[in-house]
Amino acid sequence: MRVWWVDFSELDDQRVLGQHQEIHMLHSLIVGRRNPWGGFLWRDEPFIISVHNRIVVEMEERGWFGHKTPMETTIDHGWDIDETIERLNTKERIQTRVKTDRWHLWLRWQGEYQGRIPISLLSMGAKKDYKDAHLRYQAQGGCLHDGPTEDIGEGRRLCLLCKWYYWDKDGTSWFRIERGKRQNSAG
């Protein structure tokens, strides 16, 4: 789950580490192999490096020192971060993406904020987005599992919105993933 537009202080530990791993993989794919992905091109390397550096700062804020995988510019691009942002998004699209990312985080957290800094210290916009997410989550009774899924083998499909349930091969029920146990879920 790529959440580059949400401030990394809003993420839980697992997602910060996941973002760090993902940015290295994407740098290798997009820049190293010059393979476009998600609208990013090899010349967007300065932006990709800036995301990496923000993740590393957040890791240090959490007391995780000893980072051993620096990311440095490999070539002169003649391109800067603002040009990448301008090419990929308008301000309105970024704001929409942030709201969507916060909703997806809320689903992954099963309706309970798990970021590093308390929700009371977030920006007004973040507080509103999480309040809206909470109200929506409560109104619909949790994740509806109505988004994309991923094949996890044996005919099962994992809900990529919450990652807590999978659709069984019989196609009739969602099952909760919890410490190797299955629990049937309405839906």
Image (cartoon, helix red, strand yellow):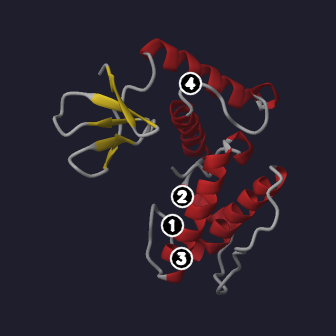
Residue at the spot of label 1 = 40
- The quadrant in which residue 18 appears is bottom right
Tell us which disc is closer to us: 2 or 3: 3
Spatial CA distance of label 2 from label 4 is: 30 Å
Going from the N terminus, do you reach mark 2 or mark 3 first?
3
Spatial CA distance of label 1 from label 2 is: 8 Å
Residue at the spot of label 4 = 111
The residue positioned 26% from the left and 52% from the top of the image is 153
Spatial CA distance of label 1 from label 3 is: 12 Å
Residue at the spot of label 3 = 28
The residue positioned 47% from the left and 82% from the top of the image is 33
| Amino acid at pointer 1 | Phe
Residue 39 shown left or right of residue 129 in the figure: left
Tell us which disc is closer to us: 4 or 3: 4
Tell us which disc is closer to us: 2 or 4: 4
Residue at the spot of label 2 = 88
- The quadrant in which residue 85 appears is bottom right
Dot 2: element = helix
Going from the N terminus, do you reach mark 4 or mark 3 first?
3
Residue 82 image position (x, y, % from top left): 68, 62
45 lies above or below 6: below
Going from the N terminus, do you reach mark 1 or mark 4 first?
1
| Amino acid at pointer 3 | Ser
Dot 4: element = loop
Q: How would you rate the neighbour count of disc 2 (Cα within 10 Å): few for under 14, some for 14-19, many for 20 or more?
A: few
Please, which residue is most extreme toward the top here? 139
Spatial CA distance of label 1 from label 4 is: 32 Å
